[in-house]
Image (spheres, coloured by chain):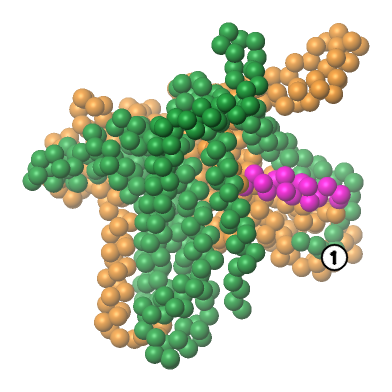
Amino acid sequence: MERRAYYRNGVLPWLLIGPQLILVLVFFYWPTTQALYWAFTLEQPWGGGNSWVWFDNFLAIFRDDEYWLTVARSAFYALCTTGLSMAVALFLACFVDRALKGTKIFQSVYVWPYAIAAPAAGVAFRFIFAPQSGIVGSINHIWPGIWDPATNGVHALIMIIVCHAWLGIGYNFIFFLAALQMIPRSITEAGAMDGARPVRRMFDLQLPLIAPTVFFLLIMNLISSFTDSFGLIDTMTEGGPVGSTEVMVYKIYFDGFKGLDYSGAAAQSIVLMLLVIALTFVQFKWVEKRVHYN
Amino acid sequence: MIERSPVFNFVTYAAMTLGLLVVLVPFWIVIVAGSQSLQEVSRVPIVLWPSSHLWENIQTAWARADLGPKMLNSLIVSIGVTTGKIVLASLSAFAIVFFNFKARMVCFWLIFITLMLPLEVRIVPTYAIAANALLPFQVILDTLGITGLIEAVSSIRISLEWNLLNSYTGLILPLVATATGTFLYRQFFMTIPDELVEASKMDGASPIRFFFDVLLPLSRTNMLALATIMFVSSWNQYLWPLLITTDRANYGTVVMQLKALIPAQNGTPDWNVTMAGALIIMLPPLLIVAFMQRWFVRGLITKDK
């Protein structure tokens, strides 16, 4: 990022960047440090500040079977939403990339889910999947009791996963389409001349060429399914039935704000932060090696 | 397009139509259910065709969730976040790209690391800081001994306090404090050729003049993209507003009200009202995305890659 031509000024850059730095300090670095502090301390029951407890808070959550269940559930949730959403988006992007007449209309509609608030989609999907109402619930009329997310944890989880995946379609589609369109036509044409059919070209040409985008989206989707699920879960199931849709973010919220166990919630936050940082780090490592096509 | 076989074209259209259904069916169901009466919406299976009660359902939802003031709050917060972000992001990116000062790279990394951790992950401590946003400065003053010094000299004890709970600042500021926009602007400023800077320096333009007369007009597309992305994401915030507003009547946003619209477990299953409410709540960002698509798609791709 070196420039040959730039300005030299002692005060001005600090004035320009100052507000942003202050905000970042107050709302990012301070809270993150605070989370670390809480994670390693425990509040005294009758006041008198926090006492340093080393890794006790972490050990407490790691010894809790329920916590591991939440982690496993979050991982499952993240993999399913990511896989489902990316598969649908890639499928659509591949066909849109053919640029037949009228494709523009399809293309602009596919982006719409990006604009929808997670809780709004949550409310809509809750109605769609409601066992008493007449959409998915209709099958209960044919086979009574076959679908009931209100009491069956697996059904509830499926419902949320479908909704989260739907919300991600727009974002993933935008990136897949942009990546596909960046592949030079000549390469595709050369492949076609060698006798490769569309499906063959898809797997042997396009997918390897857009691998960096696939990987980037994989990481972004995983992070978002680990962190963004609160709005959906809170409007659709509130973690129920009996905790079967409680994922990491929801547990942090619940332990921290409903249970007022700041130390436990902070320790859980740190674990989630490390997870997100690890994912981002993998992403950065990959970016260095990414494919360039000119 | 290489294959021109009509069969393959047909397959393409069929697949795209299928995709259209996947994306549109939830919207369609919201509109249909939102326009039906209680009897119609409770029918099993439901008739998937709009009825005539949309307007009255919207009015019921509007009154039940008190959407008027909430819409205004959502609008204030979204516009606040969007403007705040654009101003701060363009200024800080300008400093990082066009000035050569010692701590430049440190500032760069200080800001960009924030891209890593979304607000949801550090929600508990961020909530704590909102109770007193000036606490970090108090601690700094205390550890540097300035508080004690001033107390000794003037016998005034400094205690900084700024409570952000139940205020627009509390709803807005933490959302502004991330690097998304800065990154977008930085990416764009990097593409400005050195010659342009040299030329304006030679013409005797100050950095500020250069910023306003050269950079800002050039980055108009960039600004539209960022504005769209920020408006949508701040309108759709849920967890943060939920925490920071205990006084829902005055500072609640529309998205928070969605939960209040869901029929109670044993109450009347008036999903028609819920869907009508959901429809108007999701409409503003949807319209913006639909109309601004060309710009925001470009912005989104440069932002994250």
Give whichever of A146, B155 is nearer the camera: A146
What secondary structure predominates along the stretch shown in magenta?
Answer: helix
Q: Which residues are magenta?
A: B101-115
Q: Is residue A207 above or below residue B244?
A: below
Which residue bears the numbered disc 1? A4
Give whichever of B70, A211 is nearer the camera: A211
Percent of width and height locating residue B273: 26, 35
Give whichever of A147, B67 is nearer the camera: A147
Chain letter corresponding to the colour orange: B
Percent of width and height locating residue B194: 80, 67
Q: Is residue A217 magenta?
A: no
Q: Chain of mark 1?
A: A
Mark 1 closeness class: few <14, some 14–19, many ≥20 residues within 10 Å = few
| Residue A9 visible in rendering | yes
Q: Is residue B113 magenta?
A: yes
Quadrant for the C terminus of chain A, please: bottom right
Identified at 79% across, 26% down, the residue is B140
Colour seen for chain A = green
Res A22 → quadrant: top right
Q: Is residue A285 left or right of residue A89?
A: right
Q: Is residue A6 above or below residue B137?
A: below
Identify the amino acid type marked 1: Arg
* Residue sitting farthest toward the left: A142
Percent of width and height locating residue B136: 72, 27
Identified at 89% across, 10% down, the residue is B152
Q: Is residue A141 above or below residue A192?
A: above
